Image (spheres, grey):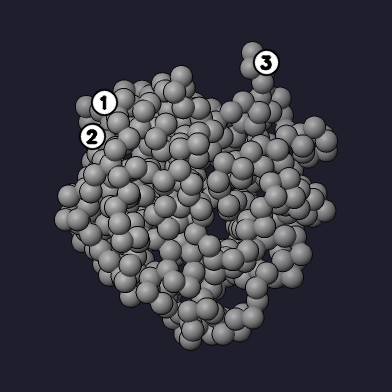
């Protein structure tokens, strides 16, 4: 089924596509790899969904323009172990959702609209988008709140579908929530990107939900809850996602609990092994990548757990240190720690120069491209946020920065202006050199 055409039909657009002039005017290119840069997110997010789709098709690596979106789209093929070398770029799809009055909605459409400005995968390694929110958050899902009120993205509900912040629930008579995710994944894959999502494993940050019933607390000791967790993640994998970023993964099985900042019990080591094995087995996917937060220190522990990569081990500011670890880990094909440009706990204040240096070291810190270490970035590393907020604040709260109650005003004010455009251009210049390697 052509899910992109279903999405177009849901907004009463015809399915015939045309080359997008605006995209050509902002085009950056590295060999056959194409994307747009030297832009502000506002310029993308205010476009229509059809203009966004036409932009993605205009950026195709192919040499003919598709007048109709293809019926069958394959994920970019980097082999089964692609996750060990990938760049993971987390997009806070809730923060870029439509903030209309007190409502927060349609984050999946905003995620599609921002895709043209994400550099596609390189010759030798994949770029993978991680969406911050998929499941409903426990408090205030579907609403924005004042900047000083908590509305954490780290507390989720399982068993009751997908977040009202993300899914467009106004077009369900034409396209289901699952099909909206499939449309996003088809467009991302067409653009040369892998895709994944963030999940949480701290028991007190998860609720089990059913229609017309009170939520119940999640417990790893409850076999039904364990099955629910596995099956909800398998469903998403079957919709086209191939990576799962696991919050608090370092502490699975009670490891280094003195530094644990989550809330509630974590699965045992053996339970997590079972969970990851079952997600792979039940989905039938051999290409999955499981990424652990702060998976530093005992690499064998994480590899045997079933992870493919982990964050925050290598000093990102030091090019020689990155290159050293690239050479040391060059033969590791199952698990590798990575270089962190920034993470979801980033509280801002880092200079543009420091971010650019970290991206440079992530993209070029090796002797051969095949030895590249994985890297981890946030939306802010491509599109700088306004100065009075930061990545972590937007994970913990969901403010609207609109001055008149419109989504357009929120998108305009969420990010920096002219200096952000110039920074985005400099990031693109780094990727120009990297994508042809």
**Position of the C terminus by quadrant:** bottom left
Q: Is residue 168 left or right of residue 245?
A: left
Q: Nearer the viewer, residue 226 or 141?
A: 226
Left/right of residue 151 with respect to residue 233 in the rendered view: left
Task: Answer above or below: position of 237 versus 347.
Answer: above
How many marks are shown on the rendered structure? Answer: 3
Residue placed under numbered mark 3 in the picture: 213
Q: How far from the left and from the top, in percent, is residue 211?
A: 64, 17
Which residue was labeled with disc 1?
405
Q: Nearer the viewer, residue 347 or 12?
A: 12
Does the residue at mark 1 contact the one at mark 2 (Cβ under 8 Å)? Answer: yes
x, y percent for residue 22: 18, 49
Q: Residue at x 66, y 52 (%)?
A: 285
Tell me the residue at 35%/60% (across/down).
62
> What's the distance in space between the residues labelled 3 and 2, CA to CA?
37 Å
Does 410 sit left or right of 222 as displayed? left
Q: Residue 356 sits in which quadrant?
A: bottom left
Could you tell me which residue is drawn at 62 percent across and 31 percent down? 157
**Residue pictured at 61% horizontal, 43% vertical:** 238
| Chain-order first, disc 3 or disc 2 | 3
| Disc 3, SS | loop
- Say which residue label 2 marks: 409
10 Å crowding of disc 3: few (<14), some (14-19), many (20+): few
Q: CA distance from mark 1 to mark 2?
A: 7 Å
Observer-nearest residue: 343 or 16?
16
């Amino acid at each position: 089924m052509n899910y992109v055409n279903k999405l177009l039909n849901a907004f009463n657009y015809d399915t015939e596509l045309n080359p997008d002039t605006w995209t050509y005017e902002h085009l950056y290119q590295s060999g056959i790899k194409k994307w747009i840069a030297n832009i502000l997110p506002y310029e993308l997010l205010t476009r229509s969904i059809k203009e966004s789709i036409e932009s993605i098709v205009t950026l195709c690596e192919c040499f003919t323009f598709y007048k109709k979106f293809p019926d069958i789209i394959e994920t970019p093929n980097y082999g089964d172990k692609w996750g060990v070398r990938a760049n993971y770029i987390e997009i806070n799809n809730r923060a870029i959702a439509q903030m209309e009055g007190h409502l927060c909605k349609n984050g999946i459409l905003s995620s599609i609209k921002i895709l043209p400005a994400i550099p596609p995968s390189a010759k030798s390694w994949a770029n993978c988008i991680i969406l911050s929110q998929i499941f409903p958050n426990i408090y205030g899902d579907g609403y924005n709140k004042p900047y000083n009120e908590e509305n954490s993205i780290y507390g989720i509900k399982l068993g009751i579908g997908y977040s009202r912040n993300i899914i467009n629930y106004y077009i369900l008579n034409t396209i289901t929530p699952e099909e909206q995710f499939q449309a996003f994944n088809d467009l991302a894959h067409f653009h040369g990107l892998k895709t994944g999502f963030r999940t949480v494993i701290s028991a007190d940050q998860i609720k089990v939900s059913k229609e017309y019933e009170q939520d119940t607390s999640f417990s790893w000791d409850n076999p039904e809850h364990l099955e629910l967790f596995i099956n909800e993640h398998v469903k998403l994998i079957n919709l086209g996602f191939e990576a799962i970023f696991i919050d608090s993964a370092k502490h699975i099985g009670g490891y280094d609990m003195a530094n644990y900042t989550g809330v509630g019990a974590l699965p045992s080591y053996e339970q997590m092994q079972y969970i990851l094995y079952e997600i792979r087995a039940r989905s039938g996917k051999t290409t999955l990548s499981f990424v652990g937060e702060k998976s530093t220190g005992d690499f064998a522990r994480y590899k045997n757990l079933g992870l493919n990569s982990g964050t925050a081990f290598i000093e990102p500011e030091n090019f020689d240190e990155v290159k050293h670890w690239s050479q040391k880990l060059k033969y590791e094909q199952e698990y590798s720690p990575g270089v962190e440009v920034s993470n979801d706990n980033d509280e801002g204040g880092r200079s543009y120069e420091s971010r650019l240096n970290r991206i440079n070291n992530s993209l070029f810190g090796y002797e051969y491209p095949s030895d590249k270490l994985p890297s981890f970035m946030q939306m802010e590393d491509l599109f700088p946020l306004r100065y009075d907020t930061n990545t972590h604040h937007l994970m913990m709260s969901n403010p609207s920065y609109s001055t008149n109650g419109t989504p357009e005003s929120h998108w305009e004010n969420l990010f920096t202006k002219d200096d952000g455009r110039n920074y985005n251009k400099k990031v693109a210049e780094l990727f120009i050199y990297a994508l042809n390697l």
